[in-house]
Amino acid sequence: MKRILFEIPIPYGPDGGFWSRDSGLTVLALRKMGYDVWLVAPVGPETVTTDRPVLLVSLETMKSADWWRMQNPDAVVLNTWSAPRYDAILQAALAATPRVVERLDTCVEGTAATDAKFHQALLVDARKCP
C-alpha cells in the first residue's frame, strides 16, 4: 500500500493550518517515509498554488466515483466526521478502494455517528473539548 489520500471538505487556504496539524502533518510524515500521500481539499476563495502535496478539487468532484478511481488510491482517509452531508464523498471513495477510514475527531460532539448514551459514556466528567 503506497498511495494514500487524506480528504478534508474544508476549503484550502494559505492560513488554514492545513500543514501544522492533523492530516497535513500525517501527509508530510508519510511522504518522508516514501509513501505517495496527498491532501485532498476543495479550492477556497483564497487558494494559492504551493509546493505542498495537495490536490485541489471542488466538493462536487469529491463526490465523483470516477475521480477517486482515476486517483488509484490504495487507501483513503476521510475527515468528514460521519456527517450525512458528506455521504456522497464516502460512497465515491469506496468505489475506488475498500480501504476507507472515516475520522471522527470531534470529541464525539455533534457527530451523526453517536447517540446520547454513547456520548454520555464518553464524556463522563462532562468536560468539553478545548
Image (cartoon, rainbow, N blue to C red):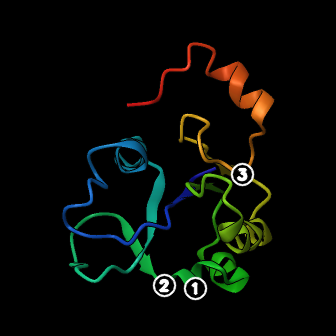
> Which amino acid, mark 1?
Thr
Residue corresponding to mark 3: 112
| Whether residue 84 is situated above or below residue 44 in the rendered picture | above
Relative side of 68 to 116, left or right: left
> Which amino acid, mark 2?
Ser
Relative side of 127 to 67, left or right: left
Instruction: Tell whether label 1 touches label 2 (CB within 8 Å).
Output: yes
Q: Secondary structure at mark 3?
A: loop
Image quadrant for the C terminus?
Answer: top left
| Whether residue 114 is situated above or below residue 45 in the rendered picture | above
Q: Secondary structure at mark 1?
A: helix
Residue corresponding to mark 1: 61
* Mark count: 3
Gap between marks 3 and 2, in whole Å?
Answer: 23 Å
x then y, percent, for residue 18: 31, 55
Instruction: Tell me if mark 3 has few (under 14), some (14-19) or many (20+) residues whose alpha carbon lies within 10 angstroms of its own.
Output: few
Instruction: Tell me if mark 1 has few (under 14), some (14-19) or many (20+) residues whose alpha carbon lies within 10 angstroms of its own.
Output: some
Q: Mark 1 or mark 3, which is nearer the start of the sequence?
A: 1
Instruction: Tell whether label 2 touches label 3 (CB within 8 Å).
Output: no
x then y, percent, for residue 116: 76, 34
87 or 117: nearer the viewer: 117
Residue 108 placement: quadrant: top right
Q: Which mark is residue 58?
A: 2
x then y, percent, for residue 119: 70, 30
